[in-house]
Image (cartoon, helix red, strand yellow):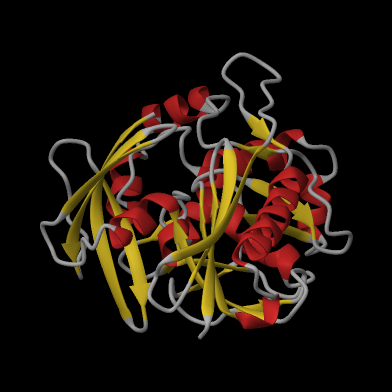
């Protein structure tokens, strides 16, 4: 018998669950972590807290299941999505707290982008509306306001990631800098039609391509970690809402799920081509498996 361990790194807590080969839960662990509100409308997390809760909840889940790490066949990560951080590739330390998806500090920057006429092009390329919710303006804020950030970027030392990217970087000892297509599609820098980072958007937001992770599939062996007491392949990444869509078995076009947590999110699977909404729904990558990318329409209540 083999087991898999799933990590759900959420907005207010981290949960890890061990499943057996019949997908029954045999062990789990959960921990909350501190929320930081330095100014009105600002929401931050300490990235080291997120990593610490991932490691500790995984160990709790293994203990609860009464198994060792070498019995785990694979580890998968699902994560709070647009939350953004930058770190120094040399030291491995964040240059600032993670700016959470709920954070509104860049709302005025978004208003200026709309006023300058960028909304249609951004919508066409990314499937997203211009909003502080997404990662791009958060990255731009960090590069502008954190002392030394631009200099580190010019030296090729700076790395950007949503939380999946940060966790995999740390779990692999700083050897793997990746995300998956579902998370990349939430940054406002990813072109849904080319399946890659968009050069024009990088120029618009003044984000150097060197800081960005490689975009990989949602289900593939990416690397392995030995931080849990044995070598475990890291074999899956998906943004939390896309993971819920898949977990609710919405694998055919027209199937819809609703989930209720820190926010409320409705996603409808739309198949192999992104659908443009006439009602301000978001077009997003649902997942990429092998060479096939599936898409979804999303309605978000923050």
Q: Quadrant of the C terminus?
A: top left
Residue positioned 49% across, 62% down in the render: 199
Residue positioned 30% across, 66% down in the render: 193
Answer with left or right where residue 96 lies relative to residue 280: right
Residue 162 at least partly seen: no
Please state which of residues 160 and 199 is positioned toward the viewer in this rendering. 160
Residue lying farthest to the right in this orientation = 91
Question: In x, y percent, where is residue 140?
Answer: 62, 41
Question: In x, y percent, where is residue 284?
Answer: 31, 54
**Residue 155 higher or lower than 128, as above or below:** below
**Residue 38 higher or lower than 127, as above or below:** above
Instruction: State the count of labels.
Output: 0
Residue lying farthest to the top in this orientation = 40
Instruction: Tell me the quarter of the picture where residue 97 sits.
Output: top right
Residue 105 at least partly seen: yes
Residue positioned 14% across, 56% down in the render: 255
Please state which of residues 4 and 274 is positioned toward the viewer in this rendering. 4
Instruction: Tell me the quarter of the picture where residue 254 sits.
Output: bottom left
Residue positioned 67% across, 47% down in the render: 85
Residue lying farthest to the front in this orientation = 66
Please state which of residues 89 and 296 is positioned toward the viewer in this rendering. 296
Please state which of residues 68 and 237 is positioned toward the viewer in this rendering. 68
Question: In x, y percent, where is residue 137?
Answer: 54, 39
């Amino acid at each position: 018998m083999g087991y898999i361990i799933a990590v759900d790194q959420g907005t207010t807590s981290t949960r890890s669950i061990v499943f057996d080969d019949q997908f029954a839960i045999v062990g789990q662990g959960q921990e909350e972590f501190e929320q930081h509100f330095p100014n009105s409308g600002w929401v931050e997390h300490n990235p080291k807290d997120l990593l610490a809760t991932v490691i500790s909840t995984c160990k709790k889940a293994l203990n609860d299941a009464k198994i060792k790490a070498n019995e785990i066949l694979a580890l998968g990560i699902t994560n709070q999505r647009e939350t953004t951080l930058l770190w120094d590739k040399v030291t491995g330390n964040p240059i600032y707290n993670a700016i959470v998806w709920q954070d509104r500090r860049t709302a005025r920057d978004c208003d200026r982008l709309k006023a300058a006429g960028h909304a249609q092009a951004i919508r066409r390329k990314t499937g997203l509306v211009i909003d502080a919710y997404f990662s791009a303006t958060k990255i731009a804020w960090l590069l502008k306001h954190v002392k030394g950030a631009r200099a580190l970027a010019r030296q090729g030392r700076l790395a950007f990631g949503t939380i999946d990217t940060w966790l995999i970087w740390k779990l692999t000892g700083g050897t793997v800098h990746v995300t998956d297509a579902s998370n990349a599609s939430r940054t406002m820098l990813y072109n849904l039609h080319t399946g890659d980072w968009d050069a024009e958007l990088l120029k618009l937001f003044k984000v150097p391509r060197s800081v960005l992770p490689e975009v990989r599939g949602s289900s593939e062996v990416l690397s392995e970690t030995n931080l849990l007491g044995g070598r475990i392949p890291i074999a899956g990444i998906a943004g939390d809402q896309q993971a819920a869509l898949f977990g609710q078995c919405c694998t055919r076009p027209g199937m819809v799920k609703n989930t209720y947590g820190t926010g409320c999110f409705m996603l409808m699977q739309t198949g192999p081509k992104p659908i443009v909404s006439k009602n301000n729904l978001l077009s997003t990558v649902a997942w990429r498996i092998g060479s096939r990318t599936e898409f979804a329409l999303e309605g978000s209540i923050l």
